[in-house]
Image: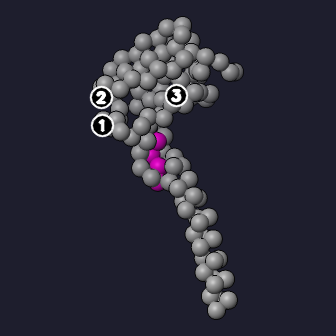
Amino acid sequence: MRTRTAIGAAVLATLAAGVPLGAAAADVPLHTEVVHREQQGEGELLLVRHLTLGGTRYELRLGREPDVYFHPVRIPAALPDDPPRITGTDWDEDGVEIRFDSGHTVAVPADAYLGGR
């Protein structure tokens, strides 16, 4: 009886440890590509598609050199378009506002993507 209990506990512990690892592995990018790029003044914006084990996800990357060092903004999967279509951007000294075809907007303050390096 003790042996079965010990084996059951070991199996449960293994499963409990494996679930978070599996969820993390599902988010590891297998392929990444830039689907939109634009620049204004010191700032540059990339819309990046990540193909992962768990599916496709999108991310905005903002910075002076967003290919190397950037401020990431994850795009929610709730946006209906694939890829999400950027319809406009308003850049000023305070930051940038990005508008999507779906009507959603994202505002990022300039110090988030111009600070740092």
116 magenta-colored? no
Q: Residues within 10 Å of mark 2 (few under 14, many from 20)?
A: some
Q: Are marks 2 and 1 in contact (CB under 8 Å)?
A: yes
The disc at residue 80 is 1
Q: Quadrant of the N terminus?
A: bottom right
Decide if residue 8 is on the left or right side of residue 31: right
Question: What is the secondary structure assignment of the residue under circle 3?
Answer: strand
Give the amino acid type for the residue marked by disc 2 in the picture. Ser
Task: Report the magenta residues as a range.
Answer: 49-53
Prevalent SS, magenta region? strand
Q: Quadrant of the C terminus?
A: top right
Residue picked out by circle 2: 102
Please report the residue visible at 30 percent of the width from the left and 28 percent of the height from the top: 102
CA gap between label 3 and label 2 equals: 19 Å
Mark before the other along the chain sequence, 2 or 1: 1
Residue picked out by circle 3: 61
The disc at residue 62 is none
The image quadrant of residue 71 is top right
